[in-house]
Amino acid sequence: MSGITVPADRTLKQPTLGFCRNPQCREVSNKEFRFTVKDDYFCCPKCKADQEPMIGVLTMTHLLIPSPTGPVIGLGGVRYQLACDQDRAYLATATNNEAATDNAKIANCPGCIVMANKQKIVKPTGESLSLDSPKP
Ligand SMILES: [Zn+2]
Ligand SMILES: [Zn+2]
């Protein structure tokens, strides 16, 4: 059996979403088909495509909330916490296909969106942060 594997260090606290770029699988025009991945090893539930780049794991973008005591250190040493996991001190690794932003409109992590709605985060600055590729 062939298929795509979910990165081993991907967060388990949120559902993993996969995508399929096969135009036949689209449900919304101009948008790839997305589905919840239930197994570590998966293919498109519709067309059964099982190779990149036709299918893959959707990048999960977490929301960063400014917090003086947060464990995540951003540009200039400003501290943040992940909206969905306030104790987590890292954002992205080379393999987990996760990212983070302080723009609530960009974040797509289900847990972070719930928290953003609860806390009514309405003033995003649009600045995105990534620990593995710091800006010069
Ligand atoms: Zn498909
Ligand atoms: Zn999150």
Image: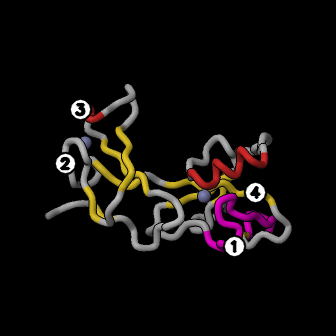
Residue 4 position within the rendered picture, expressed as x and y whole percent measured from the top left: 27, 61
Q: Is residue 35 left or right of residue 93?
A: left
Give the quadrant of residue 31: top left
- Separation of marks 4 and 3 at Cα, in angstroms: 39 Å
- Separation of marks 3 and 2 at Cα, in angstroms: 12 Å
Depth check: give the residue in front, 27 or 54: 27
- Separation of marks 1 and 4 at Cα, in angstroms: 12 Å
Query: Is ligand 2 less than 8 Å from the beta carbon at label 4?
Result: no
- Separation of marks 4 and 2 at Cα, in angstroms: 38 Å
Q: How many marks?
A: 4
Label 4: which secondary element: strand
Q: Amino acid at mark 3?
A: Gln
Label 1: which secondary element: loop
Mark 2, other Cα within 10 Å: few <14 / some 14–19 / many ≥20: few
Question: Quick one: label 1 or label 2, which is nearer the N terminus?
Answer: 2
Which residue sits at x=22%, y=60%? Answer: 3
Which residue sits at x=40%, y=73%? Answer: 8
Q: Is residue 127 above or below residue 32?
A: below
Residue 29 position within the rendered picture, expressed as x and y whole percent measured from the top left: 38, 25
Residue under label 1? 87
Query: Is ligand 1 less than 8 Å from the beta carbon at label 2?
Result: yes
Query: Is ligand 1 less than 8 Å from the beta carbon at label 3?
Result: yes
Question: Quick one: label 3 or label 2, which is nearer the N terminus?
Answer: 3
Residue under label 2? 48
Which residue range is magenta in the image? Answer: 73-90
Q: Is residue 23 above or below residue 134?
A: above
Does residue 133 belong to the magenta stretch?
no
Residue under label 4? 65
Which residue sits at x=65%, y=66%? Answer: 85
Give the quadrant of residue 23: top left
Which residue sits at x=65%, y=49%? Answer: 114
Label 3: which secondary element: helix
